[in-house]
Amino acid sequence: MASIAIDGPAGAGKSTIAKLVAKRMGYIYVDTGAMYRAIAHFLVTNNIDIENEEELVKACESISVSIQYENDAQQVYLNGENVTPFLRTEETGNMASKSSAKAPVRAALLDLQRDMAKEYDVVMDGRDIGTNVLPNAEVKIYLTASSKERANRRYKELIAKGESADFDKIEADIIERDERDMNRDIAPLKQAENAVLVDSSDMNIEEVVVAIMSLAEEQIK
Ligand code: DC
């Protein structure tokens, strides 16, 4: 089985790019952020104090996350319930950024992610895929863009959906999330030594996809 690992900060376009690369390669797209978001959704809805270790361990023991594919789209099940529609809110994203720094939360997902890469050819995106989850991935990409550009993309996305958006708040949230993801003790976001840096600030989606596809063609025989 072959793996393409795409890591990078929030809003760099990982999921858009990873989905397109997966489709063209005939691989499965695994969105690990959605798994962390599913746990975060559980923690928020059950009012778990994540600073209380005993409470958090107990919560993680009671959680089972699984992934299914329906019409090519990843669906995340939490204790048997499809929670996919609840995962993209800012509240869940912020909790995922905080709770994913905790050891019991990371331990709950590591094997699931590794097992998927054993079973299928995958494009897997996240923060620690190239560094920790799949250190032997054939292709490793560190996909980033400036915080201004990432905030700008998120802003346009919200406006297009008819939602209200405050550019400065979005950018401040992105910077705060980067800080947390890059500076935590366990599996922090960083570029793997053998990852290729792709800065998409001045690239369109197709240019990024083509760059990754050509690396994949070189590396995967
Ligand atoms: O990619 P995303 O925004 O859906 O991820 C939500 C949070 O989950 C992010 O702030 C960091 C965390 N995460 C992680 O720690 N490790 C991963 N492999 C993927 C996501």
Image (cartoon, grey):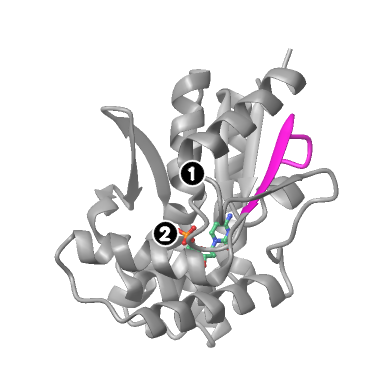
Taking the spot 54% from the left edge, 46% from the top edge, the residue there is 203
| Amino acid under disc 1 | Asn
Residue 7 percent across, percent down from the top left: 63, 51
Taking the spot 49% from the left edge, 28% from the top edge, the residue there is 22
Tag on residue 204? Answer: 1
Which is more toward the observer, 56 or 211? Answer: 211
Which is more toward the observer, 204 or 103? Answer: 204
| Amino acid under disc 2 | Ile
Classify 10 Å Cα crowding around label 1: few (below 14), some (14-19), many (20 and above).
few
First in sequence, mark 2 or 1: give its number: 2
- The quarter of the displayed image where residue 144 is located: bottom right
Residue 186 in view: yes
Label 1 secondary element: loop
81 to 168, vertically: above or below: above
Residue found farthest to the right = 193
Tag on residue 63? Answer: 2
Taking the image as shown, residue 124 lies to the left or right of residue 20, namely right
Residue 131 percent across, percent down from the top left: 76, 51
Taking the image as shown, residue 90 lies to the left or right of residue 134, namely left
